[in-house]
Image: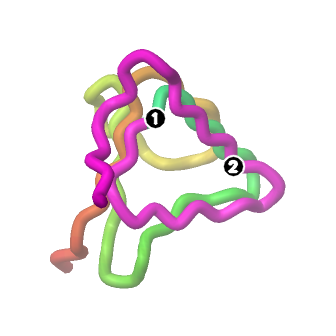
Amino acid sequence: PYTTVGPAVNNGVIVSLKNNSTWTVKGNSYLTNLTIDSGSKIVVPKGYKVKMTVNGVETTIKTGTYTGAIVLTVAPNQD
């Protein structure tokens, strides 16, 4: 069976990337807290791109801590 992903509602979804971690995002992800430390990164498979919004505002993915309604959207790269 398949799982349908959707926004986090009652329970927070927390991701912490530390110690030069790499998270390969293969599908849309819904979080409530995201921490990316120096040296860690978010990547997508070749031929795809990722966009992050925090509380509906497009936000550059970089070192830092983000809280709220965080959505990572993965789409084919049209370039």
Circle 1 packing at 10 Å, graded few (<14), some (14-19), many (20+), is many
Q: Which residue is at the far front?
A: 1
Vertical comparison of 39 with 31: above or below: below
What amino acid is at disc 2?
A: Leu
Residue 77 pos. (x, y %): 24, 75
Kindly report which numbered mark, 2 or 1, lies closer to the viewer in this rendering: 1
Does the magenta stretch mainly form a helix, a strand or a loop? Answer: loop
Circle 2 packing at 10 Å, graded few (<14), some (14-19), many (20+), is some
Q: Quadrant of residue 68?
A: top left
Residue at point 42%, 16% (across, down): 10
The magenta-colored residue range is 1-30
Residue at point 54%, 59% (across, down): 42
Image quadrant holding the C terminus, namely: bottom left
Q: Is 70 left, or right, of 65 in this rendering?
A: left
Vertical comparison of 2 with 66: above or below: below
Residue 28 pos. (x, y %): 32, 52
Which residue is tagged 1?
31
Q: Quadrant of residue 64?
A: top right
What amino acid is at disc 1?
A: Leu
Along the line of sight, the residue nearer the viewer: 37 or 69: 69
Along the line of sight, the residue nearer the viewer: 63 or 74: 74
Q: Which mark is residue 17?
A: 2
Please report whichever mark, 2 or 1, sits nearer to the chain's N-terminal start.
2
Vertical comparison of 72 with 77: above or below: above
Q: Is 31 in the magenta?
A: no
Q: Is 6 in the magenta?
A: yes
Residue at point 77%, 61% (across, down): 20
